[in-house]
Amino acid sequence: MLTVKQAAALLGVAPRTMYSLAAPAGPLPCYRIGRALRFEQTDVMAYRERCKCVPVQRAQAAPLRSFMIRAASTEESDLRKTFRTLGIKPRDEGCH
């Protein structure tokens, strides 16, 4: 079983962060013995693996054809319908 400092060192975070990661409010299972927290090393390592980011190759977007843009702009979106229902005038497409 790992102490808060040991678990924090494995994750590379501050010991204070471990308290917010600890269950029941956080995603990391732990044992609460009085005021002390203890973590299983397997749980800490599993959490670390779940946090791992892997690069994703993004697909390049094909250029839109003008007829597709015109077709999309003629239909009223759900957001515009909601604005109209609430009496709110939405901004024009060209204004940001």
Image (cartoon, rainbow, N blue to C red):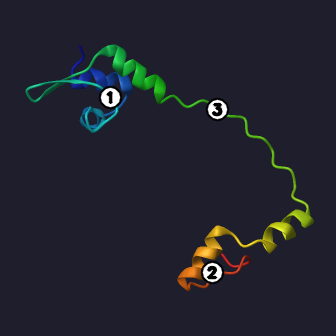
Comparing 87 with 69, the one in front is 87
Kind of element beneath mark 2: loop
In the displayed structure, 1 sits above or below 80; it is above
Measuring from the top left, give residue 7's x and y in whole percent.
29, 22
Question: How packed is label 3: few (under 14 Cα within 10 Å), some, or many (20 or more)?
Answer: few
Among the two numbered marks 1 and 3 on one chain, the one whose residue lies closer to the N terminus: 1
- Identify the residue shown where x is 87% and y is 55%: 63
In the displayed structure, 21 sits above or below 64; it is above
Whether label 3 touches label 2, CB < 8 Å: no
Q: CA distance from mark 1 to mark 3?
A: 24 Å
Among the two numbered marks 1 and 2 on one chain, the one whose residue lies closer to the N terminus: 1
Amino acid at the residue labelled 3: Pro
Q: CA distance from mark 3 to mark 2?
A: 37 Å
In the displayed structure, 64 sits above or below 37; it is below
Kind of element beneath mark 3: loop
Quadrant containing the C terminus is bottom right
- Name the front one of labels 1 and 2: 2
Whether label 1 touches label 3, CB < 8 Å: no
Kind of element beneath mark 1: loop
- Name the front one of labels 3 and 2: 2
Q: CA distance from mark 1 to mark 2?
A: 44 Å
Amino acid at the residue labelled 1: Leu
Which mark identifies residue 18? none
Which mark identifies residue 90? 2
Q: Which residue is mark 1?
A: 28
Q: Which residue is mark 3?
A: 55
Quarter of the figure with residue 66: bottom right
Amino acid at the residue labelled 2: Pro
Comparing 8 with 41, the one in front is 41
